[in-house]
Structures are given as structure tokens and as C-alpha cells.
């Protein structure tokens, strides 16, 4: 069982920065795909960014150039550095992980990959 815990959310004015963290734990855990997703009230879940085990990252068009996904050396912690935040970034942010071999580790083109494990989420609120 993989356990994911997000942290780092909060309230920020537009133009500010936040860094989200996702701590992963579980026996013999390793992921082939990890990602960040978000969902605002009344809206569909959106794929924000993914990163493969080989380090290849993908981003939604809405965050490209502003957000960066990364992992620490052990790959037990996933990060999302969010710069130049906008009010439309307001949402609950979730991290997710897929231990099994997974070909669809991408959010390009609006894809929302279904990963096996998901955290409880951390709220990000951006005011104008």
C-alpha cells in the first residue's frame, strides 16, 4: 500500500509562489509515474504535471513555464514549484502515483492519467 501526503498549500496573492510537496511511503515503493492534479469546485479534475521514472516531465498548457515538477534523489518526495500564480490556479491539488509500468504518463492534450494511488490533497487559493 502506497501512502501519499501532500503539504505546502495555502493562500497567496496573484504573482506569488508556492511549493507543494508530496511525501510517499510504503513497502518497497517505487513509481513509474507520479503526477499532480487539481480540481476546483464545480470543475472537472485537471492534470497539472507528470514525471516518469526516467525523469521525463509533462505539463498542462495552462501551467507550462510557470510550474515545475521534480523529485528528490530518493524519489520518495514529489514537488510542484508554482510561480506567477493566478486566481485560476485556485483548486485542491492532489499528488498521485502509479507503481506499475505505465505508458500514459502525460497530461499533454488535456489528458488526465488514472494513477493507482492518490493523496488527500492540499488547498491552494490565489487572490487577485
Image: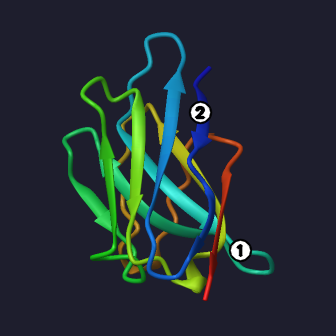
Residue furthest bottom as drawn: 128
> From where the camera sits, is residue 47 visible?
yes
- The local secondary structure at tag 2 comes to strand
Residue drawn at (47%, 77%) of the image: 85
- Residue extending farthest top: 27
Residue position for label 2: 4
> Which quadrant of the figure has residue 92?
bottom right
In this view, the residue farthest toward the right is 42
Residue, disc 1: 40
Q: Which percent across, then down, holds residue 16?
A: 45, 73
Query: In the picture, residue 41 is in which quadrant?
Result: bottom right
Pointer 2 with pointer 1, Cβ within 8 A: no
* Near-viewer residue (126 or 75): 126
Tell me the quarter of the image containing the N terminus.
top right
SS at mark 1 in the image: loop
Mark 1 nearby-residue class (10 Å; few <14, some 14–19, many ≥20): some
Q: Which disc, if any, is residue 24? A: none
> Percent from the top left, x then y, of residue 72?
30, 33
The residue lying at 48 percent from left, 43 percent from top is 21
Image-based side of 100 in relation to 69, left or right: right
Q: Is residue 104 visible?
A: no
The C terminus appears in which quarter of the rendering?
Answer: bottom right
Where residue 15 sits: x, y (%)?
Answer: 44, 80
Q: Where residue 83 appears, x then y in whole percent?
A: 38, 70
Q: Residue at x 60, y 54 (%)?
A: 9
**Image quarter of residue 5:** top right
Q: At 73% across and 80% down in the image, what residue appears?
A: 43
> From what the image shows, is residue 7 above or below residue 87?
above
Cα gap from disc 2 to disc 1, whole angstroms? 20 Å
The colour scheme applied to this rendered structure is rainbow
Amino acid at each position: 500500500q502506497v501512502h501519499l501526503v501532500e503539504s505546502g498549500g495555502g493562500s497567496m496573492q496573484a504573482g506569488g509562489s508556492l511549493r507543494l510537496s508530496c511525501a510517499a511511503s510504503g513497502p518497497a515503493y517505487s513509481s513509474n509515474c507520479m503526477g499532480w492534479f487539481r480540481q476546483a469546485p464545480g470543475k472537472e479534475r485537471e492534470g497539472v504535471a507528470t514525471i516518469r521514472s526516467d525523469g521525463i516531465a509533462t505539463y498542462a498548457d495552462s501551467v507550462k513555464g510557470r510550474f515545475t515538477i521534480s523529485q528528490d534523489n530518493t524519489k520518495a518526495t514529489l514537488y510542484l514549484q508554482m510561480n506567477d500564480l493566478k486566481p485560476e490556479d485556485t483548486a485542491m491539488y492532489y499528488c498521485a502515483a502509479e507503481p506499475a509500468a505505465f505508458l500514459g504518463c502525460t497530461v499533454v492534450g488535456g489528458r488526465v492519467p488514472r494513477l493507482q494511488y492518490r493523496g488527500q490533497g492540499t488547498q491552494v487559493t490565489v487572490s487577485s
